[in-house]
């Protein structure tokens, strides 16, 4: 493995599946960790989910499992358990997102793993944690968004709750878990001792909705003036495309009026006069409905309509260029096609072409964390069990005869059907 990366020398035993855990381990793989993805002989369920090419790993799997080595292991097999134990002895981190109690029943509880390797960090993702009334509930992305406060605060004021397209329950939890793992590894440098790290999806969604908790407490002291709709109950309402901050913001429809022909515009106090002059001349600059932020908040729906009328004569890119000239913070609503072909995205290496032995050419997202001394090379995801022999030999030191014996004993395969 490359030795000049930020996380070089850190070996991760990754037992996670689907999205939340693989997001976390992939980021650490991008940063140089040696990530060994251990799967059951059936493989991660996402290998076959939403397939677009028959008999090839799905994009759901490939886009979450780059920069990893893969091996299969039957943890119900005695020889499989023996290999897993040796992996625990040699790794710095073991990651899992099984249901509560699954690893305990296999004989690898945190207490047992810590006994095998006192320096290891064990990191777990659960839907709702290991304790509490919800601990045994199953969680998926939108379940976590529902129970963490995201759906109730997303969407139009008079519409139903809406899930966000950003995977804050799964991928958001994975980023939180990476932070916890790195913190535990740093603490281990001082103490010599590993520890257990847990992230619950519900908790992480709550954390990502923190400004909504700000507003929840402000409601005790009166209405929230920055909201375009001033009807409030005793909970934080849905706010549509309101900015949610001290400045007014909204998505303005542009020509030709397609589903994503919008420009998001933030109207800061100090830029209003320049914006008003550009849009409506002196008449708008002097309009008493908009002379300062306080009255502008009260009349913001009128303001947005005036800006929308102006925008109807321009495409979102044209309007962005006009507003950038007068330092108005704004950005076009960019759909996936826009982003896939965007020069800025290409320059930032955030959409990378890769080659896969089963599916051919495809694209993966790049690493959003940029380190000056640790440039990231994206390596395609592994096929099922691709690195079995390599890991058994190079990492664990087993010889060919021992590896053959493990294979004969069923350590890497499903039990034969009776």
Image: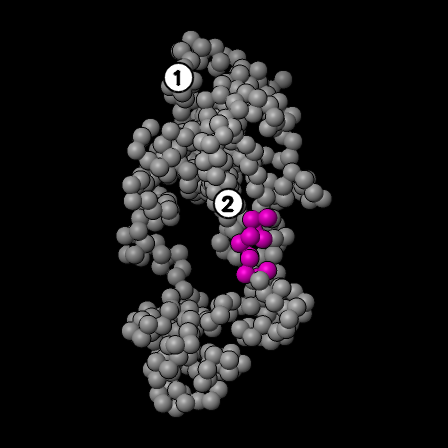
Between 54 and 314, the one lying in front of the other is: 314
319 with respect to 194 (left or right): left
The residue beneath circle 2 is 176
Residue 38 seen in render: no
The quarter of the picture where residue 32 lies is top left
Between 234 and 21, the one lying in front of the other is: 234
The quarter of the picture where residue 69 lies is top left
For image coordinates 65% across by 38% down, the residue present is 130
Between 264 and 195, the one lying in front of the other is: 195
Crowdedness of circle 1 by 10 Å Cα count: few (<14), some, many (20+)? Answer: some
User: Can you give x and y, in whole percent of width and height, for residue 165 in the image?
Assistant: 50, 55
Residue 107's place in the image compared with 240, above or below, is above
Residue 212 colored in magenta in the image: yes
Q: Do the residues labelled 2 and 1 touch (CB within 8 Å)?
A: no
Residue 228 seen in render: yes
In the rendered image, which quarter contains the N terminus?
A: top left
SS for tag 1?
helix
307 with respect to 160 (left or right): left
User: Can you give x and y, in whole percent of width and height, for residue 99 in the image?
Assistant: 62, 35
For image coordinates 49% across by 70% down, the residue present is 246
Residue 40 colored in magenta in the image: no
Q: Give the range drawn in magenta.
A: 203-213
SS for tag 2?
helix
Between 394 and 247, the one lying in front of the other is: 247
For image coordinates 31% across by 40% down, the residue present is 374
Predominant secondary structure in magenta?
Answer: helix
Residue 26's place in the image compared with 217, above or below, is above
The residue beneath circle 1 is 393
Residue 141's place in the image compared with 6, above or below, is below
The mark closer to the camera, 2 or 1, is 2
In the rendered image, which quarter contains the C terminus?
A: top right
């Amino acid at each position: 493995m490359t030795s000049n990366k930020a996380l070089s020398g850190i070996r991760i035993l990754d037992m996670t599946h689907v999205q939340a855990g693989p997001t976390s381990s992939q980021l650490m793989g991008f940063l140089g960790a040696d990530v060994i993805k251990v799967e059951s002989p059936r493989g991660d369920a996402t290998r076959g989910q939403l397939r677009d090419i028959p008999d090839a790993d799905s994009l759901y799997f490939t886009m979450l499992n780059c920069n990893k080595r893969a091996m299969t292991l039957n943890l119900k097999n005695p020889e499989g358990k023996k290999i897993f134990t040796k992996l625990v002895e040699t790794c710095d981190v073991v990651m899992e997102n099984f249901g509560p109690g699954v690893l305990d029943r296999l004989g690898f509880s945190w207490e047992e793993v810590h006994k095998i390797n006192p320096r290891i960090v064990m990191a777990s993702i659960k839907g709702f944690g290991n304790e509490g009334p919800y601990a045994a509930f199953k969680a998926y992305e939108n379940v976590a968004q529902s129970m963490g406060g995201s759906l109730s605060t997303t969407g139009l004021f008079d519409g139903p709750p809406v899930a966000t397209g950003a995977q804050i329950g799964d991928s958001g939890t994975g980023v939180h878990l990476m932070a916890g793992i790195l913190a535990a590894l740093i603490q281990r440098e001082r103490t010599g001792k590993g520890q257990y790290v847990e992230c619950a999806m519900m908790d992480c969604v709550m954390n990502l909705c923190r400004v909504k908790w700000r507003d929840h407490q402000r409601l005790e002291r009166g209405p929230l003036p920055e909201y375009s709709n001033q009807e409030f109950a005793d909970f934080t309402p849905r706010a549509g495309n309101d900015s949610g901050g001290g400045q007014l913001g909204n998505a303005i429809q542009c020509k030709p009026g397609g589903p994503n022909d919008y420009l998001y515009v933030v109207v800061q106090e100090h830029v209003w006069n320049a914006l008003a002059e550009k849009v409506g001349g002196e008449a708008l600059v002097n309009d008493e409905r908009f002379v300062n932020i306080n009255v502008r908040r009260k009349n913001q729906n009128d303001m947005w309509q005036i800006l929308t009328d102006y925008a109807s004569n321009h495409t979102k890119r044209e309007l962005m260029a006009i507003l950038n000239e007068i330092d108005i913070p704004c950005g076009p609503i960019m759909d996936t096609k826009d982003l896939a072909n965007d020069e800025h995205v290409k320059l930032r290496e955030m959409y990378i072409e890769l080659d896969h032995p089963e599916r051919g050419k495809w694209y993966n997202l790049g690493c959003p964390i940029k380190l000056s001394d640790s440039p990231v090379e994206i390596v395609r995801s592994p096929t099922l069990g691709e690195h079995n022999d390599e890991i058994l030999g190079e990492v664990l030191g087993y010889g060919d005869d021992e590896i053959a014996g493990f294979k004969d004993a069923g350590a890497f395969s499903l039990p034969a059907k009776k």
